[in-house]
Image (spheres, rainbow, N blue to C red):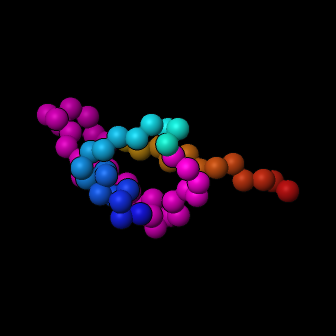
Amino acid sequence: MKQELSDLYQRVSYHVHEMRAPAPDNKQMQAILQAAMSTPDHGRLKPWHFLVIEPHKSLS
């Protein structure tokens, strides 16, 4: 998790095909979003909006 947060702060990009399970838990997701919100918005053109999509859970 430390590497992922470091990558966000350093603005490292990953392709969707490089992402692997398991997904971050809620605490980790909050840390990720906090790091993402701290990245520069060149000229403050738009406020940040994030959409968190979670895996589908079985209804059984």
The quarter in which the C terminus is drawn is bottom right
Q: Is residue 30 left or right of residue 24?
A: left
Residue furthest to the right in view is: 60
Q: Main secondary structure of the magenta part?
A: loop
Which residue appears at 29% of the width and 57% of the height?
Answer: 6
The quarter in which the N terminus is drawn is bottom left
Residue furthest to the bottom in view is: 27
- Does the magenta-highlighted stretch encompass residue 14? no
Whole-percent x, y for residue 41 in the image:
21, 39
Q: Quadrant of residue 35?
A: bottom left
Which residue appears at 55% of the width and 50% of the height?
Answer: 20
All told, the count of numbered labels is 0
Q: Is residue 3 left or right of residue 9?
A: right
Whole-percent x, y for residue 36 in the image:
32, 50
- Does the magenta-highlighted stretch encompass residue 40? yes
Q: Is residue 44 left or right of residue 54?
A: left
Which residue appears at 38% of the width and 56% of the height?
Answer: 4
Q: Quadrant of residue 44?
A: top left
Whole-percent x, y for residue 10 in the image:
24, 50
Along the line of sight, the residue nearer the viewer: 27 or 6: 6
**Residue segment shown in magenta:** 19-48
Task: Judge whether 34 appears above or below 11 on screen.
Answer: below
Residue furthest to the left in view is: 43
Whole-percent x, y for residue 21 in the image:
59, 54
Which residue appears at 45% of the width and 37% of the height?
Answer: 15
